[in-house]
Image (cartoon, grey):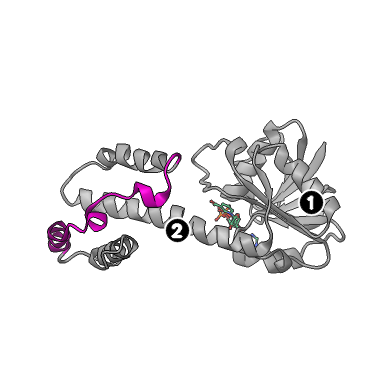
Amino acid sequence: MLKVVILGAGNVASHLCKAFVASKEVSVVQVYHRNKKSLHFFPTEVDTTTCLLDIKDADIYIIAIADDAIKPFSKGLPITKKLVVHTSGSKAMNKLSNTNRKGVFYPLQTFSKKKAIDFSEIPICLEAENETDLKLLKKLGDAISKNVQIVNSEKRAKLHLAAVFVNNFVNYLYQVGSDLLLEDSLSFDLLKPLIKETAAKIETLKPTDCQTGPAKRNDLKTIENHLHLLEDSPYRDLYQKLTKAIQQNYNHG
Ligand SMILES: NC(=O)c1ccc[n+]([C@@H]2O[C@H](COP(=O)([O-])OP(=O)(O)OC[C@H]3O[C@@H](n4cnc5c(N)ncnc54)[C@H](OP(=O)(O)O)[C@@H]3O)[C@@H](O)[C@H]2O)c1
C-alpha cells in the first residue's frame, strides 16, 4: 500500500484524494491545509491537519497548491529526503526544494470541486529525478488512471500551454456566447448540442478538418453582418482576431 500525504485542499487536492481513497493500492494518510474550513470537504476517514509540523510519514508528498506558492511552500516543509511532487502543468520540477527528492504528478484535466470526474481516463504526466522514484510515481498513477506517461518539464510546459488554448480559452468563448445570447433572452442550452458535437468531432477528425463557418468559407458578407451586430460590443476585437486567424489558416488572408 502506497502511503500518501496531500498538501493543499483545492480542486486538484480534493479530486486526487477521492480517487486515491477509492483505490485499493493507495492510502491517504493525511491531508494538510493552512486553514481548517477547506478540510471539511475531505472524507471523514482521512486524517487532516493545519499544522505542517504534524505531517505524517509517507512514501509520497503531493503539493497541490497555487503554482506561485509551490517553491516557497516546498522550502518550508519540515521533512528531508522524502519524495515530494507537485501537480502543476506549468512549473518545472526543479522549482521544488533540494531538501527532498523531487517529482511531478500532473493530471492533465480541468478540475472543479463541484464536478465529479472519472480519473481512469485522465492522462497523468510524471517526472522524477531517478528511476526508483519514477517507478513509485508510476505505481501511484496506475492506481487511479489507465493513461500514465513520462513527460519532462520542458514538454509539460508545452502541454500546459496547449491545454490553456483548448480548455481555458474555449471555456471563455462559451462565456462570450452565453453573454451574447443573454442580450436577447436566449438560453445557453440552445448551444449545448453544438458544443458537444464540436468536441465529439475531434475524436475522429483532425482539428483542421473539423472547421466550418464564415471565416473558413470566407463568407465576407456574413462576417460584415456579425461585425455590425458587434458594433458596440467588447467582443468585436476578439471576433476580428479569431476570424483573421481562421481565414489565414485556410489561405483566405
Ligand atoms: N484545477 C485544475 O484544473 C488543475 C489541473 C491540473 C493541475 N492543476 C494544478 O494543481 C495545483 C492546484 O490547483 P487547484 O486548481 O487545485 O487550485 P485551487 O483550487 O485554486 O486551490 C489552491 C490551493 O492552494 C492554496 N494556497 C495558495 N497559496 C498558498 C500558500 N502560499 N501556501 C499554502 N497554500 C496555498 C489555497 O489555499 P487557500 O484556500 O487557503 O487560499 C488552495 O487550497 C496547481 O499547481 C495547478 O496548476 C490544476
Q: Residue at x 83, y 57 (%)?
A: 130
The answer to whether residue 214 is left or right of residue 174 is: left
Q: Residue at x 60, y 48 (%)?
A: 12
> Residue 240, which numbered label?
none
Q: Is residue 68 above or below residue 28?
A: below
Report the label total: 2
Residue to which mark 2 is pinned: 165
Residue to which mark 1 is pinned: 134
The answer to whether residue 17 is left or right of residue 224 is: right
Residue 44 part of the magenta segment? no
Element under disc 1: helix
Q: Which residues are magenta?
A: 203-230
Q: Nearer the viewer, residue 129 or 118?
A: 129
Q: Residue at x 69, y 38 (%)?
A: 20
Residue 210 part of the magenta segment? yes
Between the residue at mark 1 and the residue at mark 2, the CA separation in whole angstroms equals 29 Å
